[in-house]
Image: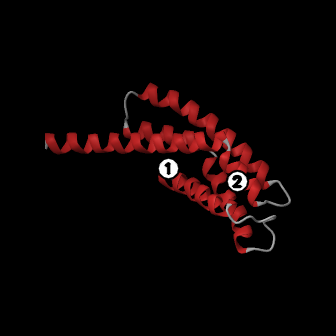
Amino acid sequence: MEIEERCNTIEECYEFMLAYAAQGLPTDNGSRSGGQVREFLDLAVNALNGLAESYATEVRNEGLEPAEKYHAFFDVLSRDAGDSLAAMELVLAQPAISSQLIDNLNASIHLRALLTDLFLVDELLKIQRQTAKHEVSTTA
């Protein structure tokens, strides 16, 4: 799974969970969005598995510097992804997923830290790519 796809999947799950939490549903059984909440969570779980490693590969492939600074941050990303993964898997293991349960997951500092990590890394990669393009165009 590509980095952008992973990020989009995780962000879409979070956005869906915000809407689901606002519905006030006591369970995920019997409603369209109830069935979807498990689908979104499953997709996000898959996107989280190996997330930091995927970013590390991207940094290596693009030759971004200083590599050691990126890799130090990927340790943070790995911890935040692991913590979020544990929380999402715990929610998925429940026989019923209420809007309140999802609201509590949304409020989790682990999930919020992960989202902030993703926004930060995404912006860093954009800046690095733009800088590289600019350097290529000015030397050509």
Display colour scheme = secondary structure
Kindly state the secondary structure of the residue where label 2 is placed.
Answer: helix
Query: What separation in Å lies between label 2 and label 1 (alpha carbons)?
Result: 26 Å
Which residue shows up at 27% across the image and 41% down it?
132
Residue 111 in the image: x percent, y percent? 63, 44
Image quadrant containing the C terminus: top left
Which residue in the rendered view is the most extreme toward the right?
95
State the residue at coordinates (61%, 58%): 13
Residue under numbered circle 2: 103
> Is residue 1 in view from this perspective?
no
Horizontal and vertical percent position of residue 46: 65, 53
Is residue 14 something one can see in this rendering?
yes
Is the N terminus in the top left, top right, bottom left or bottom right quadrant?
bottom right
Residue at (58%, 53%) from the top-left corner? 10
Question: In the image, what residue occupies the spot 37% across and 34% down?
Answer: 64
Of callouts 2 and 1, the N-terminal one: 1
> Where residue 8 sits: x, y (%)?
52, 56
Amino acid identity at mark 2: Asp
The kind of residue on which mark 1 rests is Ile
Secondary structure found at label 1: helix
Q: Nearer the viewer, residue 116 or 49?
A: 116
Query: Residue 3 — which label?
Result: 1
- Quick check: 127 left or right of 87? left
Q: Position of residue 28 (x, y in %)?
A: 78, 66
